[in-house]
Amino acid sequence: MMKIRKMESNSVLISALVLVTGLLAGCGSVNIGNDFDLQSFDSQVQHKVSTRKQVMSWLGSPQSKGVVVEADGSRLEKWTYYFGSGQMPGMKEATLKYLEIHFDATGKVVAYNWSR
C-alpha cells in the first residue's frame, strides 16, 4: 500500500516537472532566483562590522541558509544568493551570479565569495 502511494506522488511530480518545462520552453526566457547588485554589496560590506540585518536590507532574503564548518571546527552561518537568466532553447546568452556570505556567532560578516 505504501509503495503505491509513493509511486503515485512521483508520477504527479514528474508530470508537473514536464508541464513546467514545456511552459518555460514556450515562453522563451528563464529566470532563476532573485537578481541582486554584487557591486553595491561589495562596496558596502565591511569585514567583522556589517551585520545580518544590513545584508538583508541590501540584498533581501537569501535563497538558502546553511552552516560552514571550518578546518578548526568553528561553525559559521552561510547565506546564499543566486540569480540566473537566459533565453530558451540553448541558453547561449545565459547569465549566472552567485554570492555566498559567512557570518560569525555574533552575526557579523567574516567572509564572502562571489562569481558571475
Image (spheres, rainbow, N blue to C red):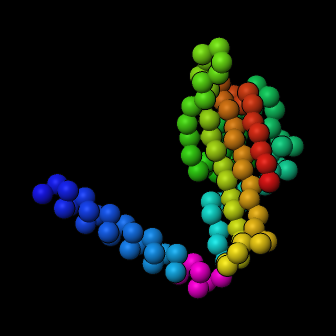
Name the residue furthest top. Answer: 72
Give 83 or 12, whichever is nearer the viewer.
Answer: 12
Identify the residue at image location x=17%, y=54%: 2
Residue that sits furthest to the left in the current view: 1
Left or right: 4, with 94 as reference point: left
Examine the structure image and report whether residue 72 is included in the region drawn in magenta. Answer: no
State which quarter of the image contains the N terminus: bottom left
Main SS of the magenta part reads helix
User: What residue is shown at x 77% (from left), y 72% (from top)?
Assistant: 92
Image coordinates for residue 65, horizontal then vertical, percent:
56, 40
* Direction bottom: furthest residue: 26
Q: Is residue 81 above or below residue 13?
A: above
Q: Using the image, determine if residue 98 lies above or below residue 55.
A: below
Horizontal side of residue 69 vs 8, given as left or right: right
- Quadrant of the rendered image containing residue 79: top right
At 60% from the left and 16% from the top, the residue drawn is: 73
Taking the spot 61% from the left edge, 48% from the top edge, the residue there is 62
Left or right: residue 39 versus residue 10 is right
Residue 106 visible at all: no
Pick the front one: 3 or 81: 3
- In the shown orientation, is residue 74 left or right of residue 87? left
| Residue 75 seen in the figure | yes
Image quarter in which the C terminus is found: bottom right
User: In which quadrant of the rendered view does residue 66 lie?
Assistant: top right
Picture coordinates of residue 23, whole percent (x, y): 53, 81
Q: Residue 5 appears at what percent x and percent y?
A: 20, 61
Q: Position of residue 32 (x, y in %)?
A: 62, 63
Asked if residue 27 lies in the magenta stretch, the reply is yes
Q: How many marks?
A: 0
Q: Which residues are magenta?
A: 23-28
Compared to residue 116, the image places residue 109 above or below, namely above
